[in-house]
Image (cartoon, rainbow, N blue to C red):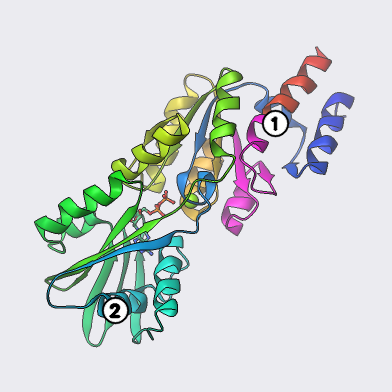
Amino acid sequence: SVPASIASAMSTGARRGLLMKGGAVIEAAAQISHVAFDKTGTLTHGRPVVTDVVTLGATTSDELLAIAASVESGSSHPLAKAILTKAEEAKITPLVAEDARAIPGSGVVATVDHAKVWVTSPRYAADNGGIVAKHLEEAARLEKEGKTAVAVFLENQPLGLIAMRDEPRADAAEAVRQLLVLGLTPVILTGDNPRTAAAIAGNLGMAFEANMMPEDKFAAIRTMSAQGGVMMIGDGINDAPALKQASVGVAMGSGTDVALETADAAILRDRVTDIPATIRLSRAAMANIR
Ligand code: ADP
Ligand code: MG
């Protein structure tokens, strides 16, 4: 049977919106030494807003948005939603896109008006002839401001950049501060680029690892596990392997079904400070048993 102090910690947690799938989660959470966070949708709201549209002479900003919105129309990625919202606000009707396909960790590609069009990370675009040098520099500048830039390109023709900003959640910095007080090591694991990651991590006072594919997040958790217990917090499909590998995987309440199903726990109200609260609660429950 479950010791009384663990059962009581679970119900206290549940009342506050911290859902733990069993008493073993409390035991594991009491023993972690590292806390790894996904960035987009976890430390940030996951609701980026378009801030900059940068074109080459051949297209106008509205044309660039129309093309990008077409390619993104089938995607549920937060960046896709930002582009679609901006197009809608500007009263731009997306063209019809066919055969849209995600390139996990890199972007999306579709056929628009018989041409293949990509909306991807500048890095992927650079590897595929989809960005001019001037825009690669411009993307780096935008990223240092904490924005995420994506490149839009046709078969062999770079078209431009769209930059978006996704604000950190209001309590993210406070949560990091509390984790440090608890003697834990917080780190961001993100698929985003190192400049955007550095800007966000710098504001929050924590370390980061960027350019991570889902399997890289998984490998990072495995490496950290050699030094002690790891709690991983995420919201996306791309976080699922890492959530499973962590000694405690925690999903954001607003996360994808895959994240919620894979995780050992969930913070239903999306408050980042519920992470240090969960650890304090777990430590107190275990101290009462011993
Ligand atoms: P995160 O770990 O921050 O949630 P993802 O793995 O989902 O990031 O995406 C990593 C990067 O791939 C993004 O920063 C972006 O450059 C690119 N990307 C992914 N999906 C899309 C999309 N639908 N549209 C444009 N770019 C995308
Ligand atoms: Mg995410």
Q: Is residue 252 left or right of residue 237?
A: right
Q: Which numbered marker is on residue 235?
A: none
- Using the rendered view, name the quadrant where residue 120 is placed: bottom left
Q: In this view, does 198 lie above or below 229?
A: below
If the image is split into quadrants, where does the C terminus sit?
top right
Tell me, for residue 277, which label it has, or none.
1
Could you tell me which secondary element the residue under label 1 belongs to? helix
Q: Could you say where residue 257 lies in the image, as x and y percent from the top left? A: 61, 58
Residue at x-position 44% and y-position 39%:
218
**At label 1, which amino acid type do we have?**
Ala
Q: In this view, does 235 lie above or below 164?
A: above
Question: On the image, numbered disc 2 is attached to which residue?
Answer: 62
The span shown in magenta is 248-277
Structural crowding at the residue carrying mark 2, measured as other residues with C-alpha within 10 Å and reported as few (<14), some (14–19) or many (≥20) = some
Q: Which residue is drawn at 11% across and 57% down?
A: 134
Residue 75, by quadrant, is bottom left
Ligand 1 placement by image quarter: bottom left
Rendering coords of residue 12 (x, y %): 83, 35
Which of discs 2 and 1 lies nearer the camera? The answer is 2
Q: In the figure, is residue 270 to the left or right of 226? A: right
- Residue 82 location, quadrant: bottom left
Q: Is mark 2 within 8 Å of ligand 1?
A: no
Q: Is-magenta flag for residue 254? A: yes
**Numbered marks: total:** 2
Task: Name which of mark 2 and mark 1 comes first in the sequence.
Answer: 2
**Gap between marks 2 and 1 measured at Cα:** 46 Å
Whole-percent x, y for residue 240 in the image: 52, 48
Q: Is mark 2 on a helix, strand or loop?
A: helix
Give the image location of residue 158, x and y in percent.
15, 68
